[in-house]
Amino acid sequence: MPHIGFFICPNHRILDLAGPLGAFEEANSFIEGNAYRLTVISEFGGVVVGSSGVPVHTQSFRDATFDTIMFIGGDIGSFQNPGVIAAAKDLAARTLRVASVCTGAFLLAETGLLDGRRATTHWRLAPELQQRYPSIRVEADRIFIADDNFWTSAGISAGIDLALALIEADRGTEIAREVARELVVPYRRYGGQSQFSAMSQMEPESDRIRMALAFARDHLAEPLPIERLADAARLSVRQFGRAFRRQTGETPARAVERLRVEAACIRLQNGSEPIEQIAKSIGFTDPERMRRAFVKLHGQPPQAIRRAGRQENAV
């Protein structure tokens, strides 16, 4: 019976725990015999209260052995505790597979176990992870990463994506797909974290600016000068430009560029279309212009995004 431990600290995020725990629980309904055994553990055992105030009963990490350990995200300050770091090292040393959800990567980083490895975490905290632990190769736009037997995932709900990938590795594609259908989540989300973060960052207050963004998203292949966006918002160009910048923090041209890069990311990772064809179909006048936009927003060219997507899909 494969045994999975979910290691939590005070002020953990409840969804970081509940998402993957629920996925493995659901997987058991499709497994005949040898189902997953699931245990929530902590440094001392007993009740551990998360950031939401919900108490969770746990066992001490010393009370059992595990096939997989998942370090659950939460308050980064909790991961500085020497006892917690020692517990993580001990668990990882006697476990076949080690994983983290969201900021749980910071605890793995504290142990030194991610040194020289590829890893990810929540997009907002990825720069901090890289700055604190320069020996780790942080890939900020990934939903999850598998580097040998160390798996890390992006923010919060990405713990479900990670659990589905682990289930697929253990039980095969069909069971993983069945679990995804039961949970009503995508079996495999294509594209990186930017597809979720960029639009939320630009979320405007007024319906008129939202209308312009929606119009832009639906007409990426066409020229989108500010005059056309202002017309979609039913504002003068001057009013629109000021309101757009104030509410989104972006110029209209930069926002359109972000939307085009996001659309390209999904197609790069979810197909084999030539890059030149993708560039033309989403409104970049040529591949070089798209390349410059990718380097500016992601720090790497479209070819690197495509390679990363193929590696992820091969997991």
Image (cartoon, grey):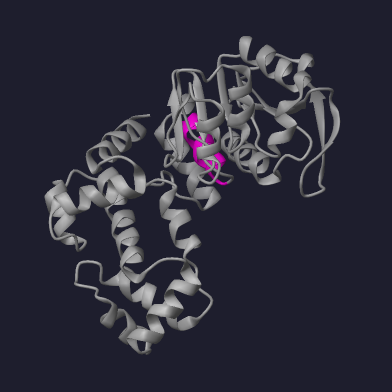
**Residue 161 location in percent, x, y?**
49, 40
Q: How many marks?
A: 0
Quadrant including the N terminus = top right
Q: Is residue 69 visible?
A: no
Q: Is residue 310 visible?
A: yes
Q: Main secondary structure of the magenta part?
A: helix
Question: Residue at image x 35%, y 49%?
Answer: 297
229 is higher (above) or lower (below) than 277: below
Q: Is residue 13 left or right of residue 235?
A: right
**Residue 122 location in percent, x, y?**
54, 42
Quadrant including the C terminus = top left
Question: Residue at image x 38%, y 73%?
Answer: 213
Question: Residue at image x 54%, y 25%?
Answer: 133
Residue 163 part of the magenta segment: yes
Question: Residue at image x 41%, y 47%?
Answer: 189
Front residue of 147 and 178:
147
Q: Is residue 166 left or right of residue 189?
A: right
Residue 71 part of the magenta segment: no
Q: Which residues are magenta?
A: 157-168
Q: Is residue 130 left or right of residue 91?
A: left
117 is higher (above) or lower (below) than 178: above
Image quadrant assignment for residue 284:
bottom left
**Residue 75 location in percent, x, y?**
71, 39
301 is higher (above) or lower (below) than 45: below
Which residue in the rendered view is the most extreme toward the right?
A: 46
Front residue of 13 and 295:
295
Q: Is residue 139 left or right of residue 124?
A: left
Image quadrant assignment for residue 40:
top right
Image quadrant assignment for residue 298:
top left
**Residue 43 location in percent, x, y?**
79, 23
